[in-house]
Image (cartoon, grey):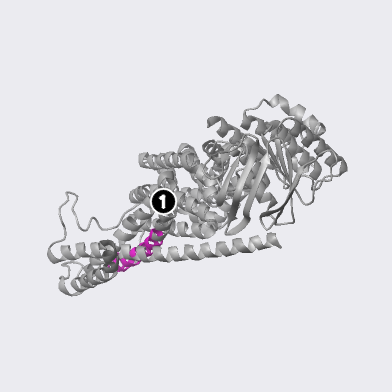
Amino acid sequence: MIRTALLVAGKDLRIERRSRVLLWQVLPFGVMALVLSGLALGPAHAGNSSAGPGLFYLVMLLVTLLMINRSQVIEGSSGTRTSVATLGLDPAGVFLGKALALAVELWITGVVVLAGAVLLLHTALVGSAEALPSVLVILAALAAAGTLYGALSGGGQGPATLLPVLSFPAFAPLLIAGERSYSDALHGGSLWQWWLISLVALVAYLGIGILLYGVLEES
Amino acid sequence: MSSPTLVVELSDAVVLVDGFPLLSGVTLELETGTLNVVTGANGAGKTSLLRLLGGLVALSSGSGVVSGVDLRTGDRRDLRRRVGWLGHEGSFYDDLSAKENLTFAAKALGRPTDEIARVLDRVGLSSRTDTPAKRLSAGQRRRLGLAWLLLRRPETWLLDEPYATLDDEGRTFFDELIGDVIRSGASVIVSAHDPLRSNALSPRTITLAGGLVVSDRS
Amino acid sequence: MIKQLSQRLLGPVTLALLALTFWLGLWVTPPDRIQGNLVRLLYIHPAIAWVGLYVSFGTSVIASCLYLWKRTRSTIMDRVAYCAMEVSAIFITLTLITGSIWGRPTWGVWWAWDARLTSTAILLVFALGYLALRRANDDPELRARRSAVFAIIAAINVPIDHFSVDWWHTLHQGATVFTQNGNFLVHGSMLWTLFLSLFAFTLLFFWLLRARYRLEVLRDQRYAASLDEALAQRRREGVH
């Protein structure tokens, strides 16, 4: 399972490095979404807003949707899918590999968007740095959940409108946990319950994915 | 019970996808180590038959055994590992190079990666090793698909319209390769619009229409 | 014989019990000391929430698990999961509506960012997502498998959602029927009417589920007939 996971993650990241979609499309989208958030807040609030953590996670949810779709689309045409199906890869390993690659991509985007939040929304640098570990865990949970929902919504071959409907209710607790833990890192406060929610969600999605990804893949 | 000399045994096999019968009752027996060509018009069910034999779609009714795996009760994932598939749309990752695609397949199958150079040479792609698959011509992409199969060495080769987009040189190369595969003991099932023109190969030709076998000539 | 009788009586008994609940709730039970006549929502809102959030959603999840387990996999389980989730979506919507009607005079707003309200709304989106997922897949087996996995994910999300929103913020009134020690907070005719409403609405769920299930069987029969016709037509293509 681990061998398959590393193989699939390596393949996905290599394709991403070649196509540069992350660099030229997803990162500019993330930064632009942050700028639009500032514009929506208005000139009085854009620079000194306490909404920074919430906006950061909202932007990351939108980025996650894009990246889930991308993660499924790179599996290629039905011919490629058929050929890869005949390799008999362990579905649990495929799930873990795709989730790992998606997590790495979200981590890279997350760090850039976090820097953007410090620069554009004036969230405190030290607090944002303190929030980084929780950001990484929540983005990993989003990656695990996203990989599962990507397969559920048709693996890049189903209707694109289905993915947000399916995934947003599951992303809600992660958005709350992320916003709260980031705010707590900025203003000080107890973090344990948000860590608990993030870790439970991460473990739950990894567990479901390992057990049930094969059921979703098989057609 | 499956006979050891038969690679395919289908009886009244029906495949339904989204409520449409792609195959409407195919009864067919194919012997191990032979070349079989499935012909028919567009929509006759050629690709669906190949997909059924590869465990890539489920059998809706009827019965069938392929490479010893029961299509109703057996593990279709196990069957998929035994077959090799070459589709007419391209069967690899477009952003990866020829070598990277084969490395992925070799590692997935637990095969040594040092066979890759030999296989690429065999299909005439040794000068295109580092070219991304999307920059290869249609014929070269078909050859890359074959290299993927040569690396795999499957028991059963399922080739979906492999002659489309091939020039005469490519067709001759393909015929030679299929001949080698048959001699090595593997079974080959090819789908094609028309019967094979090759003089070197003497296949059994099965014609489909409306998801049924309408003629069978050796 | 007994089964047939109980199936025939399910509808009339449910309607009679619901009528009795409404009569007791609207005319016999007294108004509350603080909430006045608003308390009469006690005989509808908790019962609807009980059916929507627990009975029907739970039935759908259990049927989904049984569908995924190979030994109990059958079309029956898939149908039960689907029909129960449809009933659940309607009852969760009604829970939110009756909750809002209760909330407006109590909190002064139709919607508040309260823990239970928010997590119930999230659960409704899960139920609607389940129904959308079914509509997006035409292949019966693929549809059954995907929706079963989604129902299980939704069920696992329920406590995660609940605790996250609960820790986030809460306004909702505390437990209505029991104290934390398990003692009753509601007494006399109010208590019995409340229990009657829970029972009557649970029966209503089974009645609706049965009716919906029968409709689904008819749909499947029509689908099977269309498949036979499609198969015969396809075979004719081969003959000519």
Q: Is residue B17 visible?
A: yes
Front-most of C31 and B139? Answer: B139
Front-most of B32 and B43? Answer: B32
Residue C148 screen position, x and y as percent:
45, 51
Residue lying farthest to the left in this orientation: C188
Q: Is residue C24 left or right of residue A2?
A: left
Q: Is residue A45 visible?
A: no
Secondary structure found at label 1: helix
Quarter of the image where the N terminus of chain B is located? top right
Disc 1 chain ID? C
Residue A45 screen position, x and y as percent:
49, 55
Neighbours of disc 1 within 10 Å: few (<14), some (14-19), many (20+): many
Quarter of the image where the C terminus of chain B is located? top right
Q: Is residue B153 left or right of residue A172?
A: right
Using the rendered view, name the quadrant where residue C102 is placed: bottom left
Residue drawn at x 37%, y 50% as measured from the top left: C62
- On whether residue C98 falls in the magenta region, the answer is yes
Residue C96 screen position, x and y as percent:
35, 64
